[in-house]
Image: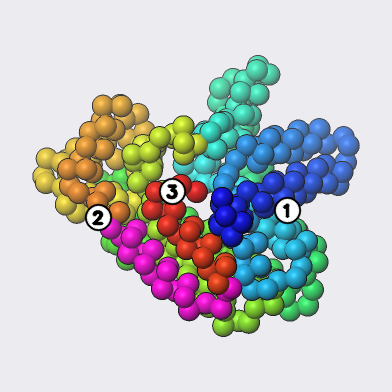
Amino acid sequence: MAPTSFQYFVNTHKPQINAELVAILAAQQNQVEPGSLAYHDLLDELSIFMARGGKRLRPLLCLLAHQGYGGSQPEVALKLAASQELLHAYLLIHDDIIDGDLQRWGGPNIEAVYQTHFKHQGLDKSTADQAARSWALLAGDICAALSLNVVAVSGLTGPRLQRSLGLLQQTVLRVLSGELDDVAAGLLLSSKQHHVQDEHNILSMYGRKTASYSFELPLQLGAIAAGAPWTELKRLTKLAQPLGIAFQLQDDLLGMFGDSAQTGKPVLADIREGKCTLLIAKTLENANAAQTVQLKQTLGKANATKAELLQVQAIVRATGADKIVLKMIRQQLVLAREALLKTGISPLAQEQIRELIASLITRKF
């Protein structure tokens, strides 16, 4: 493996990110009254959850941008990177609550862990489930607060700190607007009218819900820490948006046809939840009358059988929607490559990002 490759960068820096996250959560244990047993226990579960999870894509992008713009504050950059994984955990935990999912990163999520815990304590199912949901909600809140605090005490000062904090908070608001649109689109899809969002609205939602915090924010935070000018942040937006949209489109395909053992989350859950993904929108757009009836009967059906879910899979393939989405992924990645060439990031970092872009089509990273 070449020392200049993106995978070498991952192997070098991922252990540092993991160690920083462990240190942040351990330090938080000492900031709380010893008598708050529930809080300490929740921090323990968060530590276990975060140690199990994730490719660390967002913190790695932050470090890559910092180095790519000639940054000279690796300790600061590492803290900013860790803040991005905490932000990711916050959004995932809350997203699972919204979707009713109980699996994440190849195992039970926070809500599922506490469902089991409270049932073992003798609580009835309804009470245990409600309590577990509350614990998960608060776990997400903890991650959100820690993410903001880590940036605040990262060592950034003056305009760089103000810009970073403002960018973080504005990004969260953009993500929440995208999440709200996602939920609203699902409700409309599952309603009697079966209203389907158009392509423009779905891609706009992907840009806010996924691209803004998964690619744009970490790249920009790393650039800010390195002292990159404001014009570079705008160029990074033009790189990050198509990258993030391609990432989400690929996620839609994995959610329909992937292997839960590899993705770490349930496959076909989007159908039961009635998600208005672009993959589903293109399927409905190209379905015949019989296929449309079957789709509308199954989408949003929480107790859909395995046979019904497999039939939806077959309809998606029969309409060619999967191939349409795959083509759109490639188009977005072309836009990302073109935007990358217009940034001022170093040639080495550009090559590493090109390697990342190439891996997204098969989700090798």
Q: In which quarter of the image is residue 124?
A: top right
With 237 as the anchor, is 187 left or right in this view? left
The region drawn magenta spans 327-346
Residue 205 in picture, x, y percent from top left: 41, 61
Residue type beneath disc 2: Ile
Image-based side of 324 in relation to 134, left or right: left
Spatial separation of the CA atoms under disc 2 and disc 1: 40 Å
Magenta-drawn stretch contains 341:
yes
- Type of amino acid under label 3: Arg
Q: Please name whichever residue, 23 or 136, is drawn nearer the observer in this view of the structure.
A: 23
Closer to viewer: mark 2 or mark 3:
3
Magenta stretch secondary structure, dominant: helix
Residue 290 makes an appearance in the image: yes
Q: Which circle, 2 or 1, is nearer the viewer?
A: 2
Q: Is mark 3 on a helix, strand or loop?
A: loop
Q: Mark 1 points at which residue?
A: 146
Please tell me which residue lies in front, 55 or 103.
Answer: 55
